Amino acid sequence: MLWKLFFDFCYFFSFFIPGKKHRDYFRRVVLFDYKKKLYALKKAYPNMKFKSIRMIRGGWNIGFIINNKYVFKIRKQFDSQRIEKIIREKRMTDAFRNIVPLKIPKIDIIESDEYTFYKYEFIPGHNLNTMPMHVIMHHRHIWAKQIAEFIHSMHNANPHEISDLITKKGDSWGHNDICNNTIVDTKTMNIIGIIDWEYSGWNYLETEFKNCAAYSSKLRKADMEKLIRQEYKKIK
């Protein structure tokens, strides 16, 4: 909700920027034309009631969580090259949805006006990376086991339908950003899903382990990388 309020405030502020050229630049570059993108989304779903709209912002994308049911993501700055990245992410998730032990959202590609969105069902839960430190410490062993099983399933998979995406050196498929995209069910305290596959691809297993905690001071403090490696060895 806070991102939506922030963007709305900045959009209101933009009316006071002198000169149409400067206003348009601010809205396009700083606010990523979010108003136009939201309008295009509503145009694509004329029968959907947009009762609740939350915004997310991260990586290459911004997104709209509608009615706590659907997520619509779109590139911040849009061009044809980024459409290819959306298609690539869909191919990755389609290939691994029935292989890994955790939920991967099914992506649908939506065209509206000049924009291309990708839509998936919202996974209710809490991002592991943002859980309180004492909660992470209490549950870290079971979470390390679940993540290790997820990594193992990807490392040992060989989906033929994405073999053309192997374009660099490596030894396995990986999500490559587990640290920031692990969803925990706060009722069961189990990991239920992995979202945001924009950085996924063919890479090294070692890189996958490192990225499990590389961008989170909490997960580094909890020794999550070390615990995940230990659990992975048990599986092998």
Image (cartoon, grey):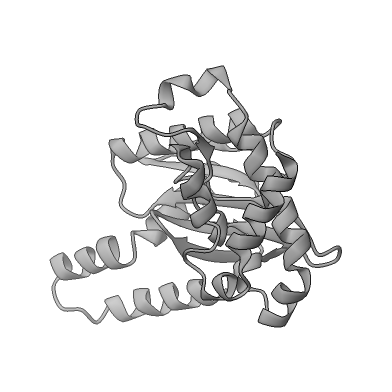
Q: Which of 55 and 57 is in front in this view?
A: 57
The C terminus - image quarter: top right
Q: Is residue 127 left or right of residue 6?
A: right
Q: Which of 119 and 140 is in front in this view?
A: 140
The N terminus - image quarter: bottom right
In the rendered image, the residue lying farthest to the right is: 188
Q: Is residue 67 left or right of residue 9?
A: right
Residue 41 seen in this snapshot: no
**Residue 202 coordinates in the image, percent (x, y):** 45, 34
Q: Residue at x 55, y 71 (%)?
A: 220
Q: In this view, does 224 lie to the left or right of 88?
A: right
Q: Which residue is drawn at 42% across and 34% down?
A: 170
**Residue 189 coordinates in the image, percent (x, y):** 81, 65
Q: Residue at x 53, y 33 (%)?
A: 92
**Residue 87 coordinates in the image, percent (x, y):** 45, 32
Q: Name above or below for residue 103 compared with residue 2.
A: above
Residue 108 seen in this snapshot: yes
**Residue 171 coordinates in the image, percent (x, y):** 47, 33
